[in-house]
Amino acid sequence: MDELKEQRILEFVLQNAVRGDPQSVVDNIDQYCRHKEWAMNVGDEKERQTMCRVVEERAPSIALELGTYCGYSAVRIAKLLKPGARLLTIEMNPDNAAVAKQIIEFAGVQNTVQVLEGSSADIIPNLKEKYQVDTLDFVFLDHWKDRYIVDTKLLEECCLLRTGSVLLADNVVYPGIPDFLEYVRFCGRYDCTNYPSHVQYMNKEDALEKAVFKGYI
Ligand SMILES: Nc1ncnc2c1ncn2CCCCCNC(=O)c1cc(-c2ccc(F)cc2)cc(O)c1O
Ligand SMILES: [Mg+2]
């Protein structure tokens, strides 16, 4: 079976990044994806700055990511978390989960980031009992675009959000998630902010949407 692109990203990181240095790991993934092969986890500079700023503003104790892919954004988020904080990241594709675990371990953030292999639909209802989650301070949505709205409603139904919980959704313009945008903007339970960005190399408009939960109104 020919090697997967994600395997080539992992090899490049293992050969070129500095073990235990998260910045070196994300810089090398950026470099590989800029010069060798585009990958869907590498947003443009503005998107990365926005994601980092939103995480730093919220300073989450417990964060959730939907769609780990190679672990790039998980390493970026982990770098910003305060001591004792943790990130749970859900990845359905076992090959991607395996790559992400190795990249997260190489970056030295394996004590902060836990990769949960499976579908968000199956794992979210178990977060309280199985993963000792009370409520989530921050959720980064970056998985299948038709799962954003379903999983947002599931997070509400499972009482995993509290007043002030921050949802940050990638790709709300491209590939685009119109049903999720309409839901968070008009259901009355979220304060929303849009952050324009671009899809790397394709000169296509994209954006991140921040939705702050106001409570179970
Ligand atoms: N736990 C779970 N539950 C459900 N699905 C799960 C999952 N865990 C994983 N997946 C499956 C996620 C598959 C990757 C999702 N991301 C994307 O599809 C994505 C695509 C682009 C893109 C941009 C320009 C183009 F020309 C083409 C594509 C950009 C992005 O930033 C993207 O995040
Ligand atoms: Mg994305």
Image (tube, grey):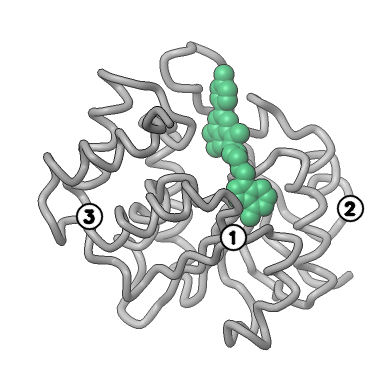
The residue under the point 80% across, 45% down is 185
Residue at label 3? Answer: 22
**Whether residue 96 is situated above or below residue 57 in the rendered picture:** above
Task: Name the quadrant where ligand 2 sits.
Answer: top right
Residue type at mark 1 is: Val
First reached walking from the N terminus: tag 1 or tag 3? 3
Which mark lies nearer to you, 1 or 2?
1
Badge 2 or badge 3: first in the primary sequence: 3
Query: Would residue 176 be found to the left or right of residue 154 on screen?
Result: left
Write down the quadrant of residue 11 in the picture. top left
The residues tagged by marks 2 and 3 sit, at their Cα atoms, a distance apart of: 38 Å
Q: Is residue 191 left or right of residue 89?
A: right
* Nearer to the camera, 197 or 106: 106
Q: What residue type is labelled 2?
A: Cys
Residue at 25% across, 18% down: 35
Of badges 1 and 3, the one in the foreground is 3
Disc 3 element: helix
The front one of 63 and 166 is: 63
Instruction: Kindly identify which residue carries mark 2.
Output: 187
Q: Does residue 168 appear in this view?
A: no
At label 3, the amino acid type is Pro
